[in-house]
Image (tube, coloured by chain):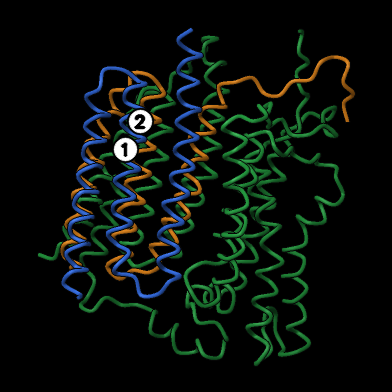
């Protein structure tokens, strides 16, 4: 059974390798970021498969990645915008 | 009984991996950004969910099962929201 | 050959490929995305090497904190690079760096390949006094019992780095808040994301610190997760960065290293030397230090990403 789970992990790893092609090609920044998201989800899948085959700590790492993969995407989306500005009437601290 | 559970694990994990492959194929082959985003969020999260369901028979304690489901729930929330944000950004840049 | 070995080897090759991509990329943005992916893959690789504590740190810092920092930085730099000004590095410089990297890699490979069987390790020696430290996680024992001095210095180094970032501010801007915040769109998906993820993340971060005594985890991983949640709140616009002149902020920043230092100095009184934990109280002391360090480290990491105080640009609308 653990053999099977590791084979599944290898298959997911292969799909992740293929998705790197999207990071390479682009063409837009968004495409690369989406590929990074895919890699994040795939990494979580691999870690959960590892947790299922005995490595308990992998579940915590997967949980960490689940919390943080959103952060990268959010930082990317928002970083193109203007930072919060104030009008001339607002007081500075 | 345990062979039935093992069979369940094998079936669900296999279908989950298949959906992962499908999502990546979509990411590589679909013609434009929004369609790729669609393939990405739907197929990958479904694949992850199926893998989680497949792994549930193998957990040692309820806490571990809860952790697995929590990971999936967080990934769902995170990717559904971030796909909305990414799609809006693409829309803004197109206009 | 075992399947897990095949997996780990495949992962190692993938990591190499991504590294080559990051270094060879011509534009900054693909390199940053590649770097975030690199951190993710390396954190899985640490699991291959049975090092869950390091994997947690790599995931939290590389995936979260550094990823956000680099993405925001590239976005800001992207505008300024359009102004022209490309400095050319001399050709010899590239060659020298390549030579140095190859030499270090070759040296490491040579050392690892010539290890005697079984490879020399201090792991067994480290496990012997584990009982007396009171914690069950050997990594925590190493960090906060055997080598507490290194951890103390490392905390102070992070504080100094943050002070270095603050020092980039202009004198006139000192009382302003660091410029890291975007306008929130109330009801939008980002605010929803923040409202769901941040509480879960904070609880998980605290759990990481708590469970670090006996299981993989610890104060640094917990602090990194808390910092990442803070950054998420900043980007979503649900929180704002406190000003550097805020006294409460400064006290919180100093709390961790100060507690660590005071407890270490008390070691002179109880046992006889710096950073000695009294027998029997060892676990209590370690937990106290971890609890004090967590908010300080989280704030330090978050403020490092938030950046120096800057004058907010006034909008002309």
Residue C278, position as x, y percentages in the image? 69, 89
Residue at 65% x, 66% y is C152
Q: Which chain is orange?
A: A
A14 vs A29, left or right, is: left
Q: Quadrant of the N terminus of chain A?
A: bottom left
Residue C235, position as x, y percentages in the image? 62, 34
Q: Which sits in the foreground, C121 or C208?
A: C208
Residue A25, position as x, y percentages in the image? 28, 23
- Pointer 1: what residue? C98
Position above or below: C99 against C253: above
Using a 10 Å C-alpha cutoff, classify the residue at mark 2 as few (fewer than 14 neighbours), some (14 to 19) or many (20 or more): few
Q: Which chain is blue?
A: B
A42 vs C210, left or right, is: left
* Chain letter of disc 1 in the image: C
Q: Which sits in the foreground, C26 or C99?
A: C26
Q: Colour of chain C?
A: green
Q: Quadrant of the C terminus of chain A?
A: top right
Picture quadrant of residue B46:
top left
Residue at 62% x, 63% y is C206
Which SS class for mark 2? helix
C131 vs A8, left or right, is: right
- Pointer 2: what residue? C94
A15 vs C60, left or right, is: left
User: CA gap, disc 2 to disc 1?
Assistant: 6 Å
Does mark 1 fall on the same chain as mark 2? yes
Residue at 28% x, 28% y is A22
* Chain letter of disc 2 in the image: C
Residue C205, position as x, y percentages in the image? 59, 59
Are discs 2 and 1 less than 8 Å apart at CB?
Answer: yes
């Amino acid at each position: 059974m653990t053999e099977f789970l590791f084979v599944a992990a290898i298959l997911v790893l292969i799909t992740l390798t293929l998705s790197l092609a999207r990071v390479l090609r682009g063409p837009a920044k968004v495409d690369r970021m989406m590929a990074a998201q895919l890699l994040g989800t795939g990494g979580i899948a691999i870690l959960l498969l590892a947790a299922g085959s005995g490595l308990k700590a992998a579940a915590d790492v997967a949980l960490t990645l689940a919390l943080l993969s959103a952060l990268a995407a959010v930082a990317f989306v928002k970083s193109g915008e203007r930072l919060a500005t104030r009008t001339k009437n607002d007081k500075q601290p | 009984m345990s062979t039935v559970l093992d069979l369940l694990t094998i079936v669900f994990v296999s279908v989950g991996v298949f959906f992962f492959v499908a999502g990546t194929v979509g990411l590589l082959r679909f013609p434009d950004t929004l369609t790729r985003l669609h393939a990405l969020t739907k197929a990958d999260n479904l694949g992850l969910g199926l893998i989680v369901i497949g792994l549930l028979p193998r957990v040692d304690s309820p806490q571990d099962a809860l952790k697995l489901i929590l990971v999936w729930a967080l990934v769902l929330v995170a990717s559904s929201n971030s796909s909305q944000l990414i799609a809006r950004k693409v829309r803004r840049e197109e206009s | 050959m075992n399947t897990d070995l095949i997996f780990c080897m495949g992962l190692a090759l993938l990591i190499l490929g991504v590294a080559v991509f990051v270094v060879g990329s011509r534009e900054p943005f693909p390199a940053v995305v590649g770097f975030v992916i690199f951190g993710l893959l390396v954190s899985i690789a640490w699991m291959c090497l049975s090092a869950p504590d390091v994997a947690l740190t790599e995931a939290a810092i590389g995936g979260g904190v550094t990823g956000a920092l680099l993405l925001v930085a590239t976005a800001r730099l992207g505008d300024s690079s359009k102004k022209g000004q490309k400095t050319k590095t001399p050709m010899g410089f590239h060659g020298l760096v390549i030579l140095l990297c190859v030499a270090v890699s070759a040296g490491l490979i040579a050392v690892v390949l010539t290890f005697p069987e079984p490879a020399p390790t201090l792991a067994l020696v480290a496990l012997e006094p584990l009982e007396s430290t009171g914690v069950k996680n050997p990594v925590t024992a190493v960090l906060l019992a055997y080598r507490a001095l290194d951890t103390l210095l490392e905390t102070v180094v992070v504080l100094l780095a943050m002070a270095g970032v603050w020092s980039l501010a202009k004198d006139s801007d000192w009382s302003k808040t660091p410029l890291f915040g975007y306008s929130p769109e109330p009801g939008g998906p980002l605010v929803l994301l923040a409202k769901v993820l941040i509480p879960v993340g904070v609880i998980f971060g605290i759990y990481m610190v708590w469970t670090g005594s006996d299981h993989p985890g610890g104060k640094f991983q917990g602090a990194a997760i808390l910092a990442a949640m803070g950054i998420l709140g900043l980007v979503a616009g649900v929180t704002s960065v406190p000003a550097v002149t805020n006294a409460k902020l400064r006290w919180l920043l100093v709390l961790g290293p100060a507690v660590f230092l005071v407890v270490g100095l008390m070691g002179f009184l109880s046992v006889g030397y710096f950073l000695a934990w009294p027998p029997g109280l060892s676990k209590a002391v370690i937990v106290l230090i971890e609890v004090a360090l967590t908010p300080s480290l989280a704030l330090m990491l978050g403020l490092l990403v938030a950046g120096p105080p800057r004058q907010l640009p006034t909008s002309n609308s």
